[in-house]
Image (tube, coloured by chain):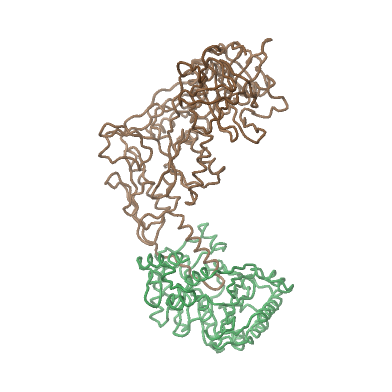
Chain colours: A brown, B green
Amino acid sequence: MDQKLIRNFSIVAHIDHGKSTLADRLLQRAGAISDRDLKEQVLDDMELERERGITIKASAVSIDMPVDGETYMFNLIDTPGHVDFHYEVDRAMAACDGALLVVDATQGVQAQTVANAYAAIGNDLEIIPVINKIDLPGAQPEDTALEVEHVLGIDAEHVQFVSAKTGEGVEELVRAIAKVLPPPKGDAGAPLQALVFDSVYDDYRGVICYLRIANGTIRKGQKVLLMGRARHYVVTELGKFRPAMTPVASLSAGEVGYMVANLKKLQDVTVGDTVTDALAPAAEALPGYDPPAQMVFCDFYPAGGEEYSELRDALNRLSLNDGSFTFQPENSDALGFGFRCGFLGLLHMDIVQERLEREAGVDIVQTAPSVSYEVLLRDGKVQRVDAAGDLPTPDKIEELREPIVETQMIIPAESVGPIMALAEQRRGEYKSQEYLSPQRVMLTYEFPFNEILYDFYDKLKSATRGYGTMDYHVVGYRASDLVKVQLLVNGQSVDALSFICHRSAADRRGRRILHRLRQEIGRQLFEIVLQAAIGSKVIARETLKPLRKNVTAKCYGGDVTRKRKLLEKQKAGKKRMKTIGRVDIPQKAFMVILEPED
Amino acid sequence: MTTSAEIRSLYVHVPFCHTLCGYCDFYSQVIDRRSVAPLVDALLLELQQLAAEHEIAIETLFVGGGTPTTLPPEELSRLLRALESLPRGEDTLEFTVEANPATVNSEIAGVLARHAVNRVSIGAQSFDPSELRVLERIHAPKQVVDTVAACRAAGIERINVDLIFGVPGQSLAAWESNLERVLELRTEHLSCYGLTYERGTPLFRQLQQGLVRRVDAEVEAEMYETTIDRLGAAGFGHYEISNFARPGRECRHNLRYWHNQTYAGIGPAAAGFVRGLRYKNVPDTAEYVRAIQAGRSPRIEHERLTLDRTARETAMLELRLIEGIDRRCFAERFGHDPMDLFRDAVAKHVELELLAVDEHALRLTRAGLLLADSVIADFL
């Protein structure tokens, strides 16, 4: 393959701006899928059913594209759209030389457009802005193009106007990809250097690595070295996604494809590692990636209590396909045996929980998500803490630091007031305000991550009548006046109900949570005292008087079975509760710290 | 144990009322003259079948409902005659019929007395017209007095009156005056029930819709405690959570339920417990009559109890009795002292002073009576 005719690129876009439809349109243009097969959004459900019923994610599709009498090879490298998966966006972009930045002509630049554009710029990609949906009545292609230039600083010279839906402008776009995006650099004759930019697990083949060949050539049967792991493997299969998996004999510099090499589990390979020849290795590895950082943590407990091993198996299975969440056994006095799990973000957490419940059929009790704090200890050591229960005692702590995220919010101009008020409430630090157009504003704030963890996005949506969009990325840790608020039930501290928060919010949150706990716990056979405390200082208190009367007035011959079943149910319900001291606490009570405020 | 016969107690359900009351969840329908005779026919047929399958030596009979006294005198008579002529056991017969105040005149009282009925249970519920309206009862307070008088005049020996406390809008003082009124009637037995909002009843819906308000739990608890004290002072023994009797006048039929002993039930929605099998008839009069006429079983629920479950159920029922669980009887019946079988529950509730234990029995304390369900749940 002539390297000059290869184009490696991603399509990036804010959600629903038409990325998948455009990808389909390109596949169709190349004849990689027939018109008849052009069901909506092939790339999106790229889980191709293989002959043995295996589903494989094709995140890199190779298509032959005739342009002006030459046949180019376009490699479309898929990227996830969501904020939680920035690191995946980054690593996909490392395999590209260019990017199509798709913007909806009726919506304009949105928060993820900004985030994706910055990621592409950061990876030195050549960007072609693609203004999509020009066929729609409300489309404002010229204004949108100006917005791209103005907000993102991307030269509008090569901007393309298309309708992925009707096909309008697609020919011109294909030509621009061929003429504007650069061919890959790299030397096919140099020692092999191939970047592993993704990996998936297949029940039959084991791990499938997605490769971008930077230099040299890789061949089937070749003995290769994974440089980061210093381990040798034999390449048993090489191929390309066209879009079905199609074996090839070799892949050369600039090409993109997949490799199967007897890797047993996802953990055997680090995405970002370099594959080189085992006998004639390259002098150095390609610059890799930082491993994805788990930013959001929570515990999963089996709701039934007895399903611990099922939950463990389900987590193990899931980790075969998703190497970016972590889990380790956890034992809580309140909830029993479970797992502490780390996620890239909240969406990632929701996805994992949903997959566990749906695919493994395990009902999960999930504790409140928390961020990962940094603790500077008196002895100068720095420690990460992601659960209030793990926080060292105050006398050992020199400084507590919390993660800060920079957040871009694109909102209607009339919502600026309410959003700034909301940001204020959440300890936001104003960075900038930029008018995209007279009607639309981009606000940039820095927030403590935990302030936007629960419900910030919902609040933003409702304050902007659904028009607001946001994206965030972690910019670092900052010292903050954080405290651990302990919850005590009849004097006994309950870790699962304790939380870390800013001192200014401790009283209010403590009182609110006690109030809700009181409702969930309900009167029992004796008096219950609920307290919130910082260290030994009680900041809030609620008292539940003992239950006064709970008696079935009538129980005659016809009532026996029903009454017995009612009481049995009551007892079974109690069994599912956690007992702290003598107090029965329903599992729902552990969820109160999850609830949004106000 | 006075006889080895299988069935010594029988419940008969008459599913008719003049009007339906908003709080009641017993199976009943508004009486329709045409369905009366077929129902009585069916009851008599089911009775025959029962007698064919089991040895009967009847000692307690209870005709409930519904309102059995809504039946026309000749139909009531036909039913009672059949019951009266069942083979008797060694104990003297206790024969109870439930009645509502507005349904008993001297003619009906005469019918009852003529057919060996010796106990009438009157659903008075309240002497306060506004409370009666909330409960959707059709009688006037005065009719309770008249009914008691009619029964006495007919020669009925034992009379029970049912009252309900915790009626929406009722004050503690209003309840106390109800108690005084009922004591004036000098009956042998009183049942005082805390109002239960039963799922599916109109009253339950009214509660959910906020149309009526529950009496404060604290006030309701005081009403109950006042009841125990006041009736005790008037010479009534408190023998079950909601039941009070002059010495020796406890309801023997109901005691059989609370000791989890065998009883048969006939009629729509009637339940029975025979040979370790709990059953219930279909709660639909027309369907019940059709089943009996066609020779099909009217039973829709069956549950065969294991020994363990029977033991737990027995504990549940006997704890309702003030005398509690007799440890020796329980051990003879189930092979375990209840102290062993229910060790954790006993320890917990003794510590909370809701349960008292001595060498003979396990029983709820005064505080335990108010929290009986919380205690009993731990025995199941």
Which part of the image, by quadrant, shows the N terminus of chain A? Answer: top right
B222 left or right of B83 in image: left
The residue drawn where x is 61% and y is 71% is: B279
Which part of the image, by quadrant, shows the C terminus of chain A? Answer: top left
Asked whether residue B79 appears in the rendered view, the answer is yes
Q: Residue furthest right?
A: B294
Rendered image quadrant of residue A213: top right
The foreground one among A303 and A447 is A303
Q: Considering only vertical position in the picture, is A277 above or below B296?
A: above
B324 left or right of A400 in image: right
Label tally: 0
Could you tell me residue B358's position as x and y percent?
Answer: 36, 75
Asked whether residue A136 appears in the rendered view, the answer is no
Could you tell me residue A272's position as x and y percent?
Answer: 48, 24
Could you tell me residue B204's position as x and y percent?
Answer: 53, 62
Could you tell me residue A160's position as x and y percent?
Answer: 60, 15
The foreground one among A4 and A130 is A4
A374 left or right of A253 in image: left
The foreground one among B92 and A151 is B92
